[in-house]
Amino acid sequence: MDQGGAPPVFSASAEIDGDRLRVVVAGEVDMATADTMLQTALREPAGRIILDLRAVTFFDSAAIHALVRLAQQFPGTLTVLPSRQVRRVLDISGLGGQSWLSPT
């Protein structure tokens, strides 16, 4: 049922500082937006990636898949800063103990 509200706003931006890429994602990461998050992170060559998901309000299985792909692409050099919602989804999916997931 359509509630008549505005659609959730999604954004993904990247800034590079030397060999470090910081990708800031906000809003809902789902089947429609997960690839944009992934492509934003892959757009610039980087030695280290910080994926800032602290402003993410929804994170589904497509988002998890994109995140796992990033972790495989950047082993040992990816850091994920989760929102409370992202942390919960990753904990439920069994990924809460991954080394790339920041404890904060």
Image (cartoon, rainbow, N blue to C red):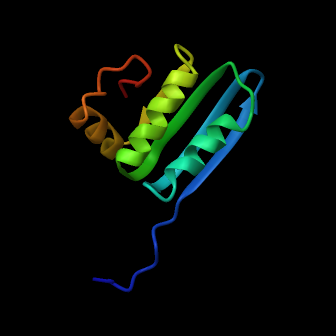
Q: Residue at x 40, y 16 (%)?
A: 99
Say whether residue 38 is left or right of residue 2: right
Quick one: quadrant of the C terminus? top left
- Residue 38: horizontal and vertical position, in percent? 57, 41
- Residue 72: horizontal and vertical position, in percent? 51, 22
Say whether residue 45 is left or right of residue 42: right
- Residue 40: horizontal and vertical position, in percent? 65, 43
Q: Given the current orientation, which residue lies at the most extreme left position?
A: 92
Quick one: quadrant of the N terminus? bottom left
Q: Which residue is drawn at 43% across and 50% down?
A: 56
Q: Which residue is drawn at 63% across and 43% down?
A: 39
Q: Which residue is drawn at 49% across and 59% down?
A: 32
- Residue 43: horizontal and vertical position, in percent? 72, 38
Q: Given the current orientation, which residue lies at the most extreme top position?
A: 76
Q: Which of 72 and 27 is in front in this view?
A: 72
The answer to whether 76 is drawn above or below residue 17 in the figure is above
User: How many marks can you see?
Assistant: 0
